[in-house]
């Protein structure tokens, strides 16, 4: 049977709510903090896992995978960055709490070279004590759509369709035309991967983006790249996988999505006791631990105002994306 997964999301790793996977029309997770206001949904093909106490859907409500053949998963974000942030400082990628160096599979360097072909702006330290991998958000996302709002009073309602590639609202029309940004993913990635082309995002910029690919098979927990495959289950060390959007210096966090394996058979095979794993906790679980009473969980509740978070383990001048995008 496919491994069971639990997906959580929130404004920080300390404020997470269980995300209703594949409920991409009716139940996107709302993120509200003093840094970011918007929505997140996660789609996984043939999903088996925790859907946040709502009906488990093996495929998205929107028919996403029927419309976009070859993809197997997606993190879709729509929202506004409420305080000004430079695009070259706005990064998206992965962080881990413990070393990976002893569990990284043979062929990792080959996989990283492949990722760098797609995303030359990728920076990483996978062999450090607290590994990380990041890229500028506007360079690493597979699809980006931006729109200049007339005011910053509210965030428009959630739109479940995959964003149509168009980041031209971020530049003067003559510059956008010169750089061929309309509908051109590679042109947008190349342009915003260069720090010299940095622009400022404000609360009047509505940003919709989709981080998606067909390389990860969640039914077998494996990665398939041209020429070879890697078993994630074989090398998994029990850590949740965090996708984080933050500033490059780690001082500001905008949103976090956490993938966690909750399959007891895999845990037993790996010799991992639940008490030893320290999996990610939802906000409700964290509060329950503190008060010794567990409140009724909310399947897709709004994740509220962001708490003060510690500085992420990113070198001051480095940042940037694991995963294969």
Image (tube, rainbow, N blue to C red):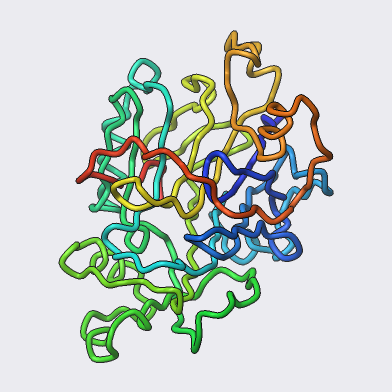
Numbered-mark total: 0
Q: Nearer the viewer, residue 57 or 247?
A: 247
In the image, residue 63 lies at what x, y percent? 69, 64
Hey, which residue is sitting farthest left in the picture? 196
In the image, residue 42 lies at what x, y percent? 61, 52
Quarter residue 14 falls in = top right
Hey, which residue is sitting farthest front in the picture? 291
Q: In the image, is residue 317 above or below residue 145?
A: above
In the image, residue 40 lies at what x, y percent? 59, 58
> Which residue occupies 34% across, 45% down?
250
Q: Nearer the viewer, residue 210 or 234?
A: 210
Q: In the image, is residue 203 above or below residue 37?
A: below
| In-image side of 289 versus 190 (left or right) | right
> Which residue occupies 26% across, 47% down?
116
| In-image side of 4 versus 134 (left or right) | right
Q: Nearer the viewer, residue 188 or 98?
A: 98
| In-image side of 27 versus 71 (left or right) | right
> Which residue occupies 74% across, 48% down?
58
Q: In the image, is residue 71 above or below residue 231?
A: below
> Which residue occupies 24% across, 91% down?
174
Instruction: Please state, as top left, top right, bottom left or bottom right, where the N terminus lies in the image.
Output: top right
In the image, residue 254 lies at what x, y percent? 47, 55
């Amino acid at each position: 049977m496919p491994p069971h997964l639990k997906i959580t999301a929130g404004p920080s790793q300390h404020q997470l709510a269980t995300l209703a996977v594949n409920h991409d029309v009716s139940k996107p997770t709302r993120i509200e903090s003093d840094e970011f206001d918007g929505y997140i949904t996660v789609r996984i093909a043939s999903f088996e896992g925790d859907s946040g106490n709502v009906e488990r859907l093996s495929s998205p409500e929107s028919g996403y995978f029927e419309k976009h053949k070859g993809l197997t998963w997606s993190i879709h974000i729509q929202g506004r960055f409420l305080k000004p942030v430079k695009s070259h400082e706005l990064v998206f990628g992965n962080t881990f709490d413990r070393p990976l160096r002893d569990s990284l599979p043979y062929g990792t360097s080959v996989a990283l070279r492949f990722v760098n072909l797609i995303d030359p702006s990728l920076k990483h330290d996978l062999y450090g004590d607290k590994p990380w991998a990041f890229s500028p958000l506007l360079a690493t996302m597979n699809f980006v759509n931006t729109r200049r709002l007339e005011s910053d009073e509210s965030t428009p309602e959630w739109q479940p369709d995959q964003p149509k590639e168009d980041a031209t609202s971020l530049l003067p029309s003559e510059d956008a035309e010169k750089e061929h940004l309309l509908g051109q993913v590679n042109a947008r990635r190349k342009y915003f991967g260069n720090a010299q082309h940095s622009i400022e995002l404000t609360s009047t910029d509505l940003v919709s983006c989709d981080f998606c690919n067909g390389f990860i098979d969640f039914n077998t927990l494996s990665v398939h790249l041209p020429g070879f495959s890697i078993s994630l289950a074989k090398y998994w060390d029990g850590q949740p996988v965090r996708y984080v959007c933050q500033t490059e210096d780690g001082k500001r966090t905008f949103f976090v999505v956490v993938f966690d394996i909750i399959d007891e058979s895999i845990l037993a095979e790996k010799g991992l006791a639940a008490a030893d794993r320290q999996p990610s906790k939802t906000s409700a679980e964290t509060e329950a631990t503190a008060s010794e009473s567990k409140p009724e969980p909310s399947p897709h509740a709004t994740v509220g105002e962001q708490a003060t978070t510690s500085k992420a383990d990113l070198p001051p001048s480095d940042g940037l994306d694991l995963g294969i995008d």
